[in-house]
Amino acid sequence: MELIYLWINKTQNNFIEKSGVCFNKSYNILFDVEKRKLSIEYNNLYYNIFENDIISNVSAIVGKNGSGKTTLLNYIYNMEVMPNQKEEREEYLITKKQQEEIERTLQVFRFKVKDKWQLNVYHNFEYDIEVVQKGILISNVNNDEYDFGSFVQSEKELFNITKVYLTNSSYYESNGYYLEYGKTSKVALNISTIGVLSKSFYRKLVGFPIGIIKDNLFYGLQDMIITTKTQQNLQEICDIIYFDYILRKNKTFEGKIQTELHITNIITPKLIHNVPGKSPSTYYSNQDFPSIIKNKIENWKLLYRNFAISYNNIIDGLYLNLLFELYFIDESISSKLKTLKGIEDVIKCIGNYLEHSSIEYKDYYLMAVSEIEEYSKIIVNTHEFNNGWPKDDVAHIYGKVINYENNPDLYLNFTAFINKCAFSEKSFVLKYIKIDNLEMSSGERSYLNFFSWLNTLKFLNHISQEIIKSTKDNILLLIDEIDLYCHPEWQSNFIEFLLDELKNQFSGKRIQVIFTTHSPITLADIPDTNVVYLEKGQVKEKEGKTFGQNIYNLFKDSFYLENTMGKFSERIIGGVYDKLNYIIDNQLSNVSKYYEDIEYCKYIISIIGESVIKISLESKIQQIEDEYKSTRLKNIISEYTDLSKDEKERLIKYIINTNQEDN
């Protein structure tokens, strides 16, 4: 399934109005909104170089800043062909009409039916649209005969698409994802929405209910722990899962694979002590959590002093976190804690308690014990992390080092364990694990974000309990500023690597890619037939080839550049031109007084990179110097003529003697 044409009546910001956009030039499409006629003609001279079993097409949107690129991408993502809602309340009629103006749209898709393309047109105009050509299906969703509800539920045609909006920009806002009967219809992946998904992910890990929440200590504690989770926590997991995929597939990745990981733990009492308000944030509780937390932490500190174990040991720390959770939700275990000393006592206490306990969340904590045991076997022989500070200093960090270069099997066992926990129904370890040393340059982080988020699409149903199916059969991948933060070398490889990743990771899906870009390097991988040019909110037709094109020409022609030189350098170089021209035109007879100006001009010329400009200015310098030499010679001859015969003979003799000494 592929979106080949979109007609926009009006965008939310009114920037694009009554404009048609064609994404597949194998069709010449013209919609006359006044005559209510749609013309579609097939162009047999077009060949889709991107199409394969997975990719349906790739299109680029280009234009200056403020031309409407992001507006168009947002419109595609947000706008559905929805029927008009009935509204009889007079006070809402004006608002309803304004909203209908924005929502009015016509969209043309093509479907593969028995190895042949079938074109379907969908619109929500109040009147019918005539299609000039035969054999094209047209559906007015406002028509009573169009069974809108059954089409949505059965995922037929238009409703068998998941739209994905992916950007590294921090300015895009979205709720994360939208569902239709538990199946993802839209998902936005960016820094802010990864934070939203992070909360969903950790709710899933503890089995936090979607609907009615029991007001008890277990859910109150889990809610406060989840409150502390940020975009970074889920990003750490996404990074590790993607590293695991790349290394096991032995793929070449242009970005950075962090081969040395530093593993630490989060400590439960310290975590909930720092929770704002010290109360659940997603539901109202009748329990006095601030007082409960204060008492529990104070008592735990007294108990902890008697333990001969420490949070500094990763595995011991996880068992202590587990024991604290049990103590937090069930006061009856407190009497058994006073006699504990070593880690064996703690493990035995936890085991005995769970064996004889009838608490509602027993299965979760039995799973936690099993998970910690598995984790312990993986990291048992790892080295301690040393951050350079003495162990008795508060700045010292206790943790483990996992290095792929030194021990690839250990590294991959760890990444496989994280992968397994993330895909499990529940997890205890992931709630407390902290993976450090993932700091990167902005370009490296941007590149890794992009592809780790893309990889995340496959397991959205493991991130949120609400999602039954991660994506539908068709994916419309919308990428804003595909080249953001990327070095030119990465830009040159981006499209190739993206298409390869989509083909390898999304078998059985059909994917269409539409992206915006400011990069002529990226655009050089896209034929001009797949490029949408925008100028001040209007689609423009432009001549000129883009595929394999010279970058200079792309800058001038495809990105509407009137000048390929920076304004600052343009001003400085222009000043040199003016200065040299003034000297040439007016003051050649007295060039010496412009000595400092000429030296400055020579320096500026020496640092210019454009050879044509450089040569032009050098010729002016040469002209000035030649004229200066000529003028001095004329002056010398004039002075020689005024000399007496004796002075002339003495001067000639001096010149001869000087030349002999030099030789």
Image (cartoon, rainbow, N blue to C red):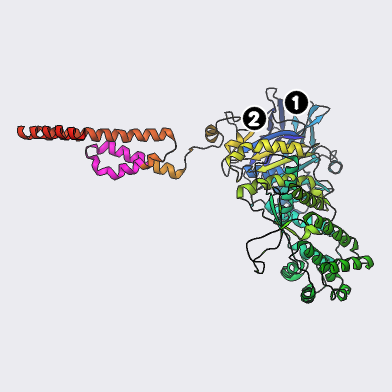
Q: In this view, does 213 lie above or below 597?
A: below
Q: Which residue is drawn at 71% across and 69% down?
A: 274
In-front residue for pair 633/152? 633
Query: Label 2: few (<14), some or many (≥20) within 10 Å?
Result: some
Depth-wise, is mark 2 or mark 1 nearer the camera? 2
> What residue is shown with label 1?
133
In-front residue for pair 396/107? 396
Give the left or right position of residue 324, taking residue 597 as reference: right
Q: Which residue is drawn at 72% across and 28% down?
A: 40
Q: Quadrant of residue 477?
A: top right
Specify the label residue 529 is tagged with.
2
Task: Determine if the magenta segment contains residue 534.
Answer: no
**Residue type at mark 2?**
Thr
**Residue type at mark 1?**
Gln
Question: Which label's residue is closer to the chain start, 2 or 1?
Answer: 1
Task: Determine if the magenta segment contains residue 578.
Answer: yes
* SS category of the residue bearing label 2: helix
Residue 567, percent from left and from top: 45, 43
